[in-house]
Image: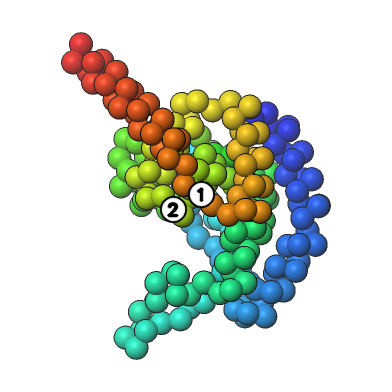
Amino acid sequence: MNRFIEIFLCLCALIVAFPLFLFAAIATFLTLGQPVFFTQTRAGKGGTVFCLAKLRTMSDARDASGNLLPDDKRVSAAGKLLRRMRLDEYPQLLSIIRGDMALVGPRPLKPETIVQFGPDGQRRGSVRPGLTGWAQVSGNTALSNEEKLRLDLWYIAHRSAALDLKIIFETVGVALFGEHRNASRLDDASSWQDLDNGIENNRVSA
């Protein structure tokens, strides 16, 4: 996506969604207390690290041994709504304006997760991570990490302004109607990856 258009859309979103974000921040404070924001180091384009910020959606509840409970046990009711509406990710609009992220692209992951993906992780990191992406509108939480990776790599190979706009519009639909696993897109990504791996193996053996 053109950088000027990306910044323009982010500025519009910052202004239009600010009242909702303010309400979300107050709800976070009332249900989870301080801090209101969750921050974590994530890998950007080329492995460059940056600080990702979002509204906190989980408590620090622990079991009798002092270990954090599973994520699904710590997400607040308000947090579930914020995640579905993507309001928890509002602060990342500033990361897009700074250039750490893109409006559309693979979601930013921890640096150690990217390393675990090996060569595929390097390919995934060849573009700026996005606020939303192909995997997020194709199932997101209903997908395994491997399935998300396949969708991310398919997106990188096929990305275009038209595809980015399609993802943005579908993100609105996901926020309104929830996430649904898209089997046909997974099949397409798997078929493309098998073909791409076959081409790469032929190059190596040639």
User: What residue did someone put label 1 on?
Assistant: 180
Please, what is the three-letter code of the amino acid marked with disc 2? Ala
Report x, y in % for residue 188. Answer: 41, 30
Q: Residue at x 60, y 59 (%)?
A: 84
Q: Residue at x 37, y 49 (%)?
A: 145
Per the rendering, the mark at residue 74 is none
Q: Residue at x 76, y 66 (%)?
A: 22
- How many callouts does the rendering have? 2
Examine the rendering and report whether any part of residue 46 can be seen: no
Examine the rendering and report whether any part of residue 73 can be seen: yes
Q: Does the CB distance between marks 2 and 1 fall below 8 Å?
A: yes
Q: Residue furthest top?
A: 206
Report x, y in % for residue 27. Answer: 69, 74
Q: In the drawing, does residue 49 fall left or right of residue 1?
A: left
Please, what is the three-letter code of the amino acid marked with disc 1? His
Tag 2's secondary structure? helix
In the depicted structure, whether residue 201 falls above or below residue 84: above
Report x, y in % for residue 181. Answer: 46, 47
Separation of marks 2 and 1 at Cα, in angstroms: 7 Å
Which comes sooner in the sequence, label 2 or label 1?
A: 2
- Crowd band around label 2 with a 10 angstrom C-alpha radius: few (<14), some (14–19), many (20+): some
Q: Nearer the viewer, residue 115 or 57?
A: 57
Q: Quadrant of residue 4?
A: top right
User: What residue did someone put label 2 on?
Assistant: 142
